[in-house]
């Protein structure tokens, strides 16, 4: 069956999809914030080689990098509640944010760790020689420098995360992908619906790529 | 004020420092000389516990630390007693000259920020960097960076400043301005331990010169004694060579 391309339909669909862009962005932003906090902790455990915990962290990173995000989301949302009643009441939106955070924190931890290790050893020595503790040195000197190094790759993960929120629709979260799917099923205009949602993602990513470049420019100017 | 007793340091099987003993009194200027790779820098780094000695006692100010039983707390306490000037400056890259100098006052000594900045500004003016207060290290010349490095060490409230070949990484044109700052500190009787190849500086400024070779202190004495009337054959050979090379 061949039907003609309905451009008008895409125009009409846009405002409907955009209403759900908030859900997508909320998942991405919260997911990123939690992932960042988690990743920083994971990275510090590995940098300081904290005994015992560092092995758990390695296992964690290996698992979340070694299995697909979709599988992790299913495990978390459909699997865990069967064994841990505490997860029964968890809604799909929360599960998606948790899943995205856990998954991306594993990748981001490695970027942050590499950035920290990339800072010249002499910076830490200079801090210690003045009587600062390792923690103070991290906070005041090493992390500010490492954050500059890590920003481009962390922004890439954020952009990746925006796109990955589309998987949340498999848990039943109604975000832009789910809405496009619903509209497509009722209108049978699959091509137009999915093209429309692709355009929305694309534009959002272009905007954030632009922000990324501005941020990098600003950070590079600092010193 | 400073007393080092039976200090030794091994890297694996390599014994870099062997039974080092010396004392420094308040306001004394010690210059350590000797061939490259004889443990001069390692000794200095041990005094600050940037390297952990294998054995021996270090006493600086009111801190006593024994290599065989030291705690993290003691190490931090010891480091507060001294400050370090690095060969490659090691200024905090993310901080301006002023912030570099003020950092230890704020973080380590808990001095209120405005007071710390005012004090740091005065120190930077003293080392001739009045117009570089808000400049980042990457935009300073080597000589300026090292003067910030010295200012940072001066700001820390330690008893002694340790200089690890402060002019070795500098282009010749910047050496004099750094030595001038150090000479000024010497005039003010700031206690200093300086590892250097600048023999002229050692001659002019030192109260005591320590000659090290192969991890030992071979000889120590006044500059006059070491440079004009050395007792040991090895000191003689080194001094002769060093002065000939025109250090």
Image (spheres, helix red, strand yellow):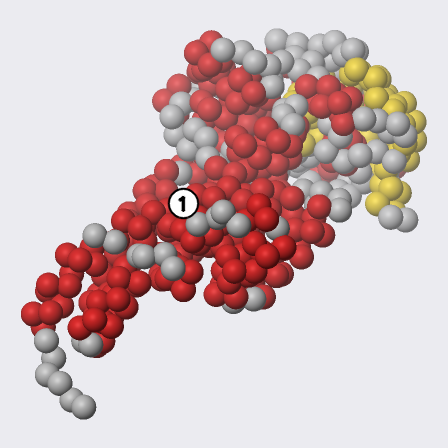
Percent coordinates x, y for residue A75 in the rendering: 55, 61
Q: Position of residue B88 (x, y in %)?
A: 58, 38
Give left or right: position of B184 versus B81: left
Left or right of B61, for residue A175: left
Camera-side residue of A202 and B78: A202
Q: Is residue A92 above or below residue B91?
A: below
Residue at the bottom extreme, as displayed: A1
Residue B247 screen position, x and y as percent: 66, 35
Q: Residue at x 24, y 72 (%)?
A: A185
Q: Residue at x 20, y 55 (%)?
A: A18
Quadrant of the rendering where the N terminus of chain B is positioned = top right
Rendering quarter of residue B96: top left
- For this orientation, the residue located farthest to the left is A8
Could you say whether the residue bearing mark 1 is in a helix, strand or loop? helix
Residue A160 lies, in percent from the top left, at 39, 59
- Residue nearest the viewer, comparing B174 with B151: B151
Q: Does residue B98 show up?
A: yes
**Residue that badge 1 annotates:** A30
Q: Is residue B173 above or below residue B209?
A: below
At 90% from the left and 30% from the top, the residue drawn is B68
């Amino acid at each position: 069956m061949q039907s003609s391309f309905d451009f008008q339909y895409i125009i009409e669909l846009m405002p409907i999809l955009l209403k759900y862009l908030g859900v997508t962005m909320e998942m991405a932003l919260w997911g990123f914030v939690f992932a960042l906090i988690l990743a920083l902790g994971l990275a510090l455990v590995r940098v300081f080689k904290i005994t015992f915990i560092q092995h758990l962290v390695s296992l964690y990173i290996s698992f979340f990098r070694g299995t697909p995000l979709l599988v992790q989301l299913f495990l978390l949302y459909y699997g865990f509640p069967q064994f841990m009643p505490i997860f029964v009441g968890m809604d799909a939106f929360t599960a998606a944010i948790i899943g995205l955070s856990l998954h991306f924190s594993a990748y981001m931890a490695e970027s942050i760790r590499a950035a920290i290790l990339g800072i010249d050893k002499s910076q830490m020595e200079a801090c210690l020689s003045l009587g600062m503790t390792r923690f103070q040195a991290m906070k005041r000197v090493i992390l500010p420098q490492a954050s500059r190094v890590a920003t481009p790759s962390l922004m890439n993960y954020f952009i990746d995360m925006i796109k990955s929120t589309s998987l949340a629709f498999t848990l039943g979260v109604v975000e832009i992908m789910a809405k496009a799917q619903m509209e497509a099923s009722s209108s049978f205009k699959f091509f137009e619906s999915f093209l429309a949602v692709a355009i929305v993602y694309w534009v959002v990513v272009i905007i954030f790529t632009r922000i990324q470049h501005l941020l990098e420019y600003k950070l590079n100017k600092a010193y | 004020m400073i007393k080092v007793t039976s200090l030794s340091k091994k890297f694996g099987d390599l014994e870099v420092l062997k039974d080092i003993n010396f004392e420094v009194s308040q306001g004394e200027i010690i210059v350590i000389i000797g061939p490259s790779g004889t443990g001069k820098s390692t000794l200095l780094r041990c005094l600050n516990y940037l390297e952990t000695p294998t054995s021996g006692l270090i006493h600086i100010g009111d801190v006593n630390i024994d290599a065989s039983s030291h705690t993290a707390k003691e190490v931090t306490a010891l480091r507060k007693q001294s400050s370090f000037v690095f060969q490659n400056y090691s200024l905090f890259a993310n901080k301006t000259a002023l912030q570099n100098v003020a950092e230890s006052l704020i973080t380590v000594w808990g001095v209120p920020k405005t007071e710390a900045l005012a004090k740091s500004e005065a120190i930077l003016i003293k080392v001739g960097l009045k117009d570089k207060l808000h400049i980042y290290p990457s935009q300073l010349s080597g000589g300026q960076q090292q003067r910030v490095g010295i200012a940072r060490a001066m700001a820390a409230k330690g008893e002694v400043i340790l200089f690890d070949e402060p002019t070795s990484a500098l282009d010749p044109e910047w050496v004099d301005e750094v030595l001038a700052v150090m000479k000024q500190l010497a005039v003010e009787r700031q206690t200093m331990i300086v590892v250097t190849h600048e023999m002229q500086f050692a001659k002019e400024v030192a109260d005591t010169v320590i000659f090290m070779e192969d991890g030992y202190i071979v000889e120590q004495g006044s500059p006059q004694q070491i440079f004009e009337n050395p007792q040991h054959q090895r000191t003689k050979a080194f001094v002769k060579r060093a002065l000939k090379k025109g250090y």
